[in-house]
């Protein structure tokens, strides 16, 4: 479960911004919150609003960039190869300063805090802490090529000496099966789930294991509930292929009092149907794994009610029994509804007119009544994060 994520000096994010899923003292929707312990509750959903080019997507891109250095292609860089480095460009100082990431999460009931910074050439700092018995304890700390370890110093110093300047110790230590960092690393591989909108529907279907009848039934149930006029779907392997499947939706219509069914291939379906189909599967994956799913522009090509349905799946504790979380950006103002989301679940990204840097803040930062029409307030510019459309001064 994600507690918070912070980033500094990445694209439009000049100063440190923090997205927190830790709930405030708001008593609304208490039953939807994820209970961590007696003192902490986490939100299952966080949404970020903002004008085009305000930088809201960069918060998610930063999460993806961080994950890429830990578990993705940038974790496999050869020695001396450059790290992905996109500092804030509109400042003479930040252009040469490091990018910094920080994340706090729970895995197997233990809280972890992990931070690192880097420039184009090397990892500059890296720290991992955990709270195994409710008390903070260092796992390792790194500054340049100097390391500090809490236990097994000799063994871990050997691993540190094998860690190239452009590689995280969290990564290299797991390549050598170091038990001290194993669980923290597993969280990034098993729980952090970026949604890739570029996957083909056939490939997505294979990844979801649609051959599994139970999974198929669950996905079909959501599609049917979305009221696409679909009565079923068929999946059959394409000849000479072990990874790509022919997927067809069955439509049933009444002709002279008789039900007539016909099948349509995916490419014949509407864009909205395809979009919902491509997304409901990853949703079910996240719900099954208790993962953290982050999606840019959730509402793209979908009716607002379908977007709302995807959010409700995460918000509903009877569906979300494994404590999955959803972080997404959107322009869909229909979701600005305090009967759906808490004030501390709604975030805004706004661009500073002078510095051009993105600022991130939540509705909780405003004195908003529980019965206030926040949709109206947002469109009136009461919370910022809306486009300036010109007009008389």
Image (tube, rainbow, N blue to C red):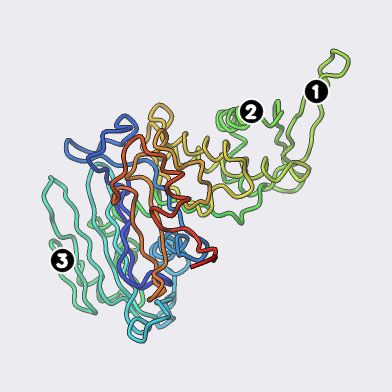
Residue located at (15% from left, 62% from top): 152
Q: State which tag comes first along the sequence, 2 or 3.
A: 3
Q: State which tag comes first along the sequence, 1 or 3.
A: 3
Q: Is residue 49 left or right of 235 when viewed as pictured?
A: left
* Residue contact at pointers 1 and 2, CB within 8 angstroms: no
**Where is residue 274 shown, x and y percent of the image?**
67, 43
User: On the rendered image, what quadrant is the N terminus found in?
Assistant: top left
Residue found farthest to the bottom: 92
Residue carrying label 3: 149
Disc 2 versus disc 3: distance between alpha carbons? 54 Å
Q: Is residue 370 left or right of 194 when viewed as pictured?
A: left
Residue found farthest to the right: 256
Residue located at (30% from left, 47% from top): 364
Residue carrying label 2: 224
Residue carrying label 1: 253
In which quadrant of the rendered view does residue 279 lie?
Answer: top right
Above or below residue 356? Residue 115 is: above
Q: Check disc 1 and report its element: helix, strand or loop.
A: strand
**Where is residue 151 shown, x and y percent of the image?**
13, 61
Work out whether residue 171 or residue 92 is closer to the camera in this orientation and state it.
Answer: 92
- Mark 1 vs mark 3: in front: 1
């Amino acid at each position: 479960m994600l507690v918070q994520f912070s980033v500094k000096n990445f694209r439009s994010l000049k100063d440190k911004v923090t997205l927190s899923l830790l709930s405030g003292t708001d008593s609304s929707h208490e039953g939807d919150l994820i209970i961590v312990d007696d003192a902490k509750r986490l939100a299952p959903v966080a949404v970020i609003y903002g004008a085009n080019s305000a930088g809201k997507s960069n918060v998610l891109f930063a999460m993806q960039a961080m994950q890429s250095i830990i578990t993705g292609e940038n974790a496999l860089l050869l020695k001396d190869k450059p790290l992905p480095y996109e500092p804030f460009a509109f400042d003479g100082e930040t252009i040469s300063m490091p990018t910094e990431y920080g994340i706090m999460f729970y895995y197997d009931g233990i809280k972890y805090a992990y931070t690192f910074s880097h420039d184009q050439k090397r990892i500059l700092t890296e720290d991992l802490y955990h709270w195994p018995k409710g008390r903070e304890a260092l796992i390792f700390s790194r500054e340049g090529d100097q390391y500090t370890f809490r236990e097994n110093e000799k063994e871990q110093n050997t691993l540190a000496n094998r860690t190239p300047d452009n590689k995280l110790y969290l990564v290299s230590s797991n390549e050598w099966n170091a038990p001290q960092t194993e669980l923290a690393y597993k969280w990034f591989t098993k729980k952090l789930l970026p949604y890739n909108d570029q996957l083909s529907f056939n490939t997505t279907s294979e990844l979801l294991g649609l051959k599994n009848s139970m999974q198929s039934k669950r996905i079909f149930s959501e599609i049917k509930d979305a009221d696409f006029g679909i009565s079923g779907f068929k999946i059959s392997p394409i000849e000479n292929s072990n990874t790509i499947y022919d997927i067809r939706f069955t439509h049933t219509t009444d002709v002279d009092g008789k039900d007539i069914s016909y099948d349509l291939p995916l490419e014949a379906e509407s864009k909205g149907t395809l979009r919902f189909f491509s997304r409901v599967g990853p949703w079910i994956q996240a719900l099954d794994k208790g993962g953290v799913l982050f999606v840019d522009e959730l509402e793209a090509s979908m009716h607002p009610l379908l977007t709302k349905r995807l959010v409700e799946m995460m918000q509903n504790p009877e569906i979300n029994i494994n404590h999955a979380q959803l972080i997404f950006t959107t322009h869909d103002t229909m979701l600005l509804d305090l009967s759906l989301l808490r004030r501390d679940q709604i975030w805004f990204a706004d661009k500073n007119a002078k510095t051009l840097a993105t600022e991130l803040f939540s509705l909780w930062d405003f004195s908003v009544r529980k019965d206030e029409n926040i949709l109206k307030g947002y469109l009136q510019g009461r919370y910022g994060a809306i486009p300036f459309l010109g007009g008389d001064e």
